[in-house]
Image (spheres, helix red, strand yellow):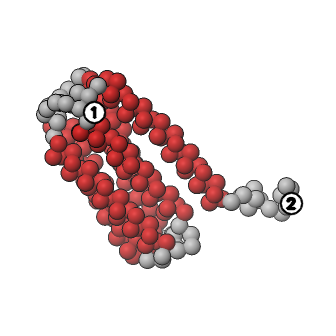
Amino acid sequence: MAVAAHATPHEAHNRIGMNTVGLWLFFLSETFLFAALLAGRFYLAGTERPEELNQQLGLAITSILLLSSATAYSAEVAISKGYRGWAQICVLLTIILGLIFFGGVVVEWSTAEFSQSEAYGTAFFSMTGLHASHVLSGVVMLFLLQGLMMRGKFSRDDHWGFEATIKYWHFVDVVWVFFYPALYLVGST
């Protein structure tokens, strides 16, 4: 199929379709990274879980992260319907919840009574550290999204960048849905 001589390469392809495929390929590559850490947790520590693990803090930060997924989804729905003000509020709430989650992880690192040189500690600090870095990068992306919205970017008909950022946030949340039970629930003390 020949492309018209006057068409640019960007016009010859479905740009949003290409972006979507690229985003999902990125998620696939990240899935391999997170899956390797998840497998490493069981390879290093088996089903061991330290008695001193702060279960209450783990449940609290998990609940906060899951709530942030709800606010992110609300933001995406709002922008797709043209409700820019509500979308901005929901993005701000998602940022706040993401920062609270990150702060909870930092508190847990500083109060953990197990060492990173122990098998479980190595897995715990590696998994939570990589995940927290992704949460932090998501928060930065949400801040950038907020700034772009304040400058009038994104509308009901043109919000791919907004949607992609929210999809990334959901991806990071889904990763935690697997990490939380592996770190906090599976195993014996």
Up/down of 5 relative to 80, above or below: above
Between 85 and 120, which is closer to the camera in this rendering?
Answer: 120
Judging from the image, what secondary structure is the residue with disc 1 in? helix
For the residues marked 2 and 1, what is the alpha-carbon distance in whole angstroms?
A: 56 Å
Name the disc covering residue 147, or none. none
Tell me residue 113's x, y (percent).
Answer: 14, 31
The quadrant of the picture occupied by the C terminus is top left
Give the residue drawn at x 40%, y 64%. Answer: 73
| Residue indicated by mark 2 | 5
Tell me residue 121's x, y (percent).
Answer: 24, 28
Point out the frontmost of discs 2 and 1.
1
| Residue 128 visible | no
Name the disc covering residue 124, or none. 1
Give the residue drawn at x 62%, y 60%. Answer: 16
Tell me residue 124's x, y (percent).
Answer: 28, 33
Between 133 and 58, which is closer to the camera in this rendering?
Answer: 58
Q: Residues within 10 Å of mark 2 (few under 14, many from 20)?
A: few
Tell me residue 120's x, y (percent).
Answer: 25, 27
